[in-house]
Each structure stands twice: as structure tokens, then as C-alpha cells.
Image (spheres, rainbow, N blue to C red):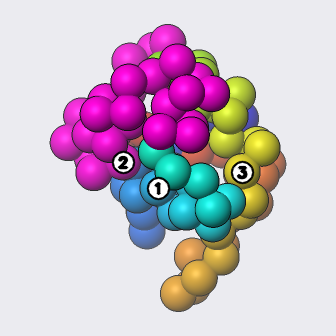
Amino acid sequence: MRLMATKTLPLGTFLRLRRIAAGLRQRDIAARGGIPPTRLSQIERNEIRPSVVERQILERLLPALPVFSGAGNHHSNDQELVDD
């Protein structure tokens, strides 16, 4: 799975919604991936783009998180998601 921003959701927003749907805190995901929580927060707020290494880490973690479906935004685990 590649991470992509969609036409309906920016990458960081999509990640945040998936994390919230899983009932996890930023520090939970950050600890699992070895990413500083402040950096994950910046990614989720779409302030910065993840580095290549961070993208690889998030791609490994993302399939373990439930899919968010709401307000007409439906994503499946097999949908390709990439950052612009």
C-alpha cells in the first residue's frame, strides 16, 4: 500500500482519521513506528510531508488500523493512497 492524498482527504487528515477510528493516541502510533509524536502531529495537521522512511513506517502501520468511512469518504485497505 502506498500512501496518497486523495481528492477528498489530504494524507495527514486520512492518517489522523484512521488513528482515531482505531482508538489510538498519536504517541501510540509514534511509539510503534519510532516517529517523534510532535513530528506525527505535524504530519497529521498537514504541516509537513513525511520523509521517505516515515512514509515506509506509516505504510506498514496503516493496514493494522481500521478503515474510516464517513461523510461520503470511503477508503478500503487495498486502495492506493499517495501524497501529492
Residue 41 appears at what percent x and percent y? 32, 42
Residue at point 40%, 58% (across, down): 13
Amino acid type, callout 2: Glu
Residue at point 67%, 41% (across, down): 62
Amino acid type, callout 3: Leu
Local crowd size for mark 1, using a 10 Å CA cut-off: few (<14), some (14–19), many (≥20): many
Q: Quadrant of residue 29?
A: top right
The local secondary structure at tag 1 comes to: helix
Q: State which tag comes first along the sequence, 2 or 3.
A: 2
Residue 26 appears at what percent x and percent y? 46, 45
Q: Is residue 76 left or right of residue 25?
A: right
Q: Is residue 64 left or right of residue 80?
A: right
Q: State which tag comes first along the sequence, 3 or 1.
A: 1
Amino acid type, callout 1: Arg
Q: Is residue 30 left or right of residue 74?
A: left
Q: Which residues are magenta?
A: 27-53
Q: Disc 3 marks which residue?
A: 65
Q: Disc 2 marks which residue?
A: 44
CB within 8 Å, label 3 to label 1: no
